Image (cartoon, rainbow, N blue to C red):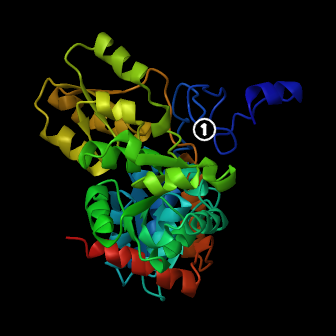
């Protein structure tokens, strides 16, 4: 609900971070981001001790995963941190853990359930922690897209490649149709493999990662790419355009990375002479083209670790990670700022807060299984096939 809508209803926005993380919509963002000007305030410090005691009581029965974009108050209880796929693999490598508590979003917990054993139970502290990008491609929409490709006479030439940031249903579709999964770190390898299997790629669900990889890393042109819009008849594309394209990009995006603009890059260069601009490949193509460095969250962390003292960096990724890195490297004399002047964070990722984590850990410690994420066996089998193809990439 926007501020204007709440005013029309004559109600005030709730101050609770769980219900409304932002007060004002940003018209420049593509969709789904509200920018309040700062991170949500931390939870009651008394909860820290409760979380510590519950985790201590559970011992080796619980393994807590923390995505890089999580709040610091949650990250402090993570046994490992990382991006979504690294965390899912870390969970699979801990078969002795009965409970996998995934502090991330829904599709990440699904991936962990797919890769872990049947004896392990994956738990998401807040079931409302979704991902707007993953939600932009449903199984029904993708099946309809495949029908459009079939009618255009090109389905047999198309290999689906789905970003890790997709639902289990989309991963299963990918596996069933001979495709593979990719991460922001290995997208080029995945596309190289796909073009060895077929003549075209259907890239789901992030158009920006697909376009940036194809054009920036593989030498394709922007004309080689078309965008399939699931909300328009035939995706808004003619059969001729589909036949001419090499990359059929799904019209999806990350709400946080999608808000960075070329103006953001130009402005920070004016404000901070000599700054290095480092962005995630989920950003728009013009932002990636104007940046000095482009890479995944793991790449961003390693780049800053290797950066010389006194260097200046503007980072185009989620705010929690940027703030954490700025604090970490400040003693080394590295200046790290958020790329945009308007502060934005992933509102769904921030739903996993300390109250939800405490409730989860205390429930498990008392023997009550809550918020389990479980993928059905057929979906799991085909999704795992797609993931295994990715693991086999050279």
User: Relative to 204, does residue 339 appear above or below in the rendering?
Assistant: above
Mark 1 lies on a secondary structure that is: loop
Quadrant of residue 315 within the rendered picture: top left
User: Relative to 223, does residue 359 appear above or below in the rendering?
Assistant: below
Relative to the observer, which residue lies in front, 109 or 380? Answer: 380
Counting from the top left corner in percent of width and height, residue 379 is at 55, 80
Does residue 100 appear in this view? no
Does residue 302 appear in this view? yes
Counting from the top left corner in percent of width and height, residue 354 is at 54, 52
Q: Which residue is mark 1?
A: 31
Residue found 61% across the figure and 59% down from its top: 126
Quadrant of residue 37 within the rendered picture: top right
Counting from the top left corner in percent of width and height, residue 5 is at 81, 30
Report the residue that reaches farthest toward the right. Answer: 9
Residue 63 as seen in the image, left or right of residue 197: right
Residue 160 as seen in the image, left or right of residue 351: left
């Amino acid at each position: 609900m926007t501020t204007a809508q709440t005013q029309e209803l004559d109600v005030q926005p709730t101050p609770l971070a769980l219900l409304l993380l932002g007060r004002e919509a940003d018209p420049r963002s593509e969709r789904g981001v509200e920018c309040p000007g700062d991170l949500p305030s931390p939870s009651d410090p008394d909860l820290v001790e409760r979380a510590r005691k519950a985790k201590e009581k559970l011992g080796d029965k619980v393994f807590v995963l923390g995505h890089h974009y999580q709040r610091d108050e949650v990250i402090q209880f993570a046994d490992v941190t990382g991006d979504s796929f690294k965390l899912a693999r870390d969970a699979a490598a801990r078969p002795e853990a009965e409970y996998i508590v995934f502090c991330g979003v829904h599709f990440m917990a699904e991936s962990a359930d797919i890769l872990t054993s049947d004896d392990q139970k994956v738990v998401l502290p807040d079931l409302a922690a979704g991902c707007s990008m993953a939600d932009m491609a449903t199984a029904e929409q993708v099946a309809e897209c495949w029908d459009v490709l079939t009618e255009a006479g090109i389905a047999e030439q198309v290999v689906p490649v789905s970003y890790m940031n997709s639902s289990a249903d989309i991963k299963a579709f990918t596996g069933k149709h001979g495709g593979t999964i990719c991460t922001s770190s290995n997208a080029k390898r995945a596309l190289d493999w796909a073009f060895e299997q077929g003549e075209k790629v259907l890239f789901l669900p992030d158009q920006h990662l697909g376009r940036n990889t194809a054009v920036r890393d593989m030498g394709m042109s922007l004309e080689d790419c078309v965008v399939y819009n699931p909300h328009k008849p035939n995706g808004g594309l003619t059969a001729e355009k589909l036949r001419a394209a090499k990359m059929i990009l799904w019209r999806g995006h990350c709400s946080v990375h999608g808000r960075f603009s070329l103006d953001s890059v130009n402005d920070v260069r004016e404000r901070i002479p000599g700054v290095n601009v480092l962005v995630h490949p989920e950003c728009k193509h013009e932002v990636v083209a104007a940046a000095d460095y482009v890479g995944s969250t793991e790449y961003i962390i390693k780049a800053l670790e290797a950066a010389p003292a006194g260097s200046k960096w503007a980072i185009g990724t989620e705010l929690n990670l940027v703030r954490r890195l700025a604090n970490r490297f400040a003693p080394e004399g590295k200046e790290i700022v958020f790329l945009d002047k308007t502060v934005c964070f992933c509102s769904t990722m921030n739903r996993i807060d300390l109250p939800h984590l405490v409730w989860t850990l205390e429930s498990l410690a008392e023997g009550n299984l809550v918020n389990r994420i479980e993928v059905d066996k057929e979906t799991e089998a085909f999704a795992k096939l797609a993931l295994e193809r990715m693991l086999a990439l050279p």
